[in-house]
Image: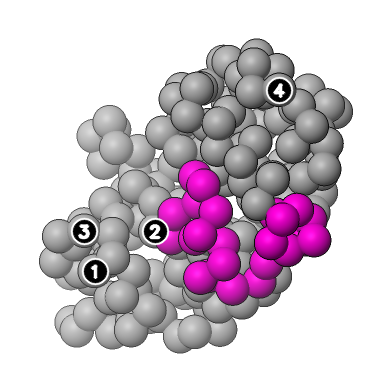
Amino acid sequence: MTKKQRAEIILQELEKLYPETPIPLDHKDPFTLLVAVALSAQTTDKKVNQITPKLFEAADTPEKMAQLEFEEIRELIKEIGLTNQKAKNLKRMSELLLERHDGIVPQTFEELEALPGVGHKTASVVMSQAFGFPAFPVDTHIHRLMKQWKLTEGKNVVQTENDAKKLFPEHTWNKVHLQIIFYGREYSPARGNGEKDFLTKMLFDR
């Protein structure tokens, strides 16, 4: 079976499992999504969703976030990791959105990735989920499963992303990256024994 054939089977099965793909991070607009994704580095979406209601109550726009002191932001997000760096990034990101973009989240990878705390994965999530541009954000679940399904050599997430984009049709990217994440969490957690991972069995036990 070729990589392309495996990718087609994966697409069919994921569509049966997850016909709807709600965005895991709670938000109401591009700015709150950008903040939530930036906060999700090295922590869980669930944890981010627990702290963002209070944060967004205090500052749900770049103007309000920029007006908060660093210490105030740090206090609001203290329950997640890398607190100091994330608080510093949120404040400076908000200031730069005001200085460079009139307080509006930009719609290009280049402009997003120029903001503090915004790497390629964060920019990809915002581009795909806030603005509908085709993108394929690769998180640890996707990186691991793409290797497990032998769809990539997966030396790094950049290679995994490039391979995913070649194997899955562009119009599916924004949905399938979430479907793979949902599948990883439910059927193939990193610390699990793989018993529930029927897709890997389906692909390689034939």
Dot 3 crowding, Cα within 10 Å, few <14, some 14–19, many 20+: few
Q: Earlier in the sequence, mark 4 or mark 2?
A: 4
Where does label 3 land, which residue? 156
Tag of residue 201: none
- Front position among marks 4 and 3: 4
| Residue type at tag 3 | Asn
Where does label 2 land, which residue? 138
Residue 89 lies in the magenta stretch: no
Dot 1 crowding, Cα within 10 Å, few <14, some 14–19, many 20+: some
Residue 35, given in percent of the width and then of the height, sits at 65, 43
Report the side of 20 relative to 185 (left or right).
Answer: right
Q: Is residue 107 above or below residue 65?
A: below
Instruction: Tell me the SS state at disc 2.
Output: loop
Residue 119 lies in the magenta stretch: yes
- Front position among marks 4 and 2: 4
Where does label 4 land, which residue? 69
Give the residue displayed 56% in from the left and 15% down from the top.
Answer: 79
Q: From the viewer's side, name the closer residue of 104 and 193.
A: 104
Give the residue displayed 55% in from the left and 38% down from the top.
Answer: 89
Residue 59, given in percent of the width and then of the height, sits at 81, 33
Residue 148, given in percent of the width and then of the height, sits at 21, 57
Give the residue displayed 33% in from the left and 59% down from the top.
Answer: 199
Image: magenta residue range: 97-120
Where does label 1 land, which residue? 159
Q: Earlier in the sequence, mark 1 or mark 4?
A: 4
Q: Earlier in the sequence, mark 4 or mark 3?
A: 4
- Front position among marks 1 and 4: 4
| Residue type at tag 2 | Val
Disc 2 to disc 1, C-alpha distance: 10 Å
Q: Earlier in the sequence, mark 2 or mark 1?
A: 2
Report the side of 4 relative to 119 (left or right).
Answer: left
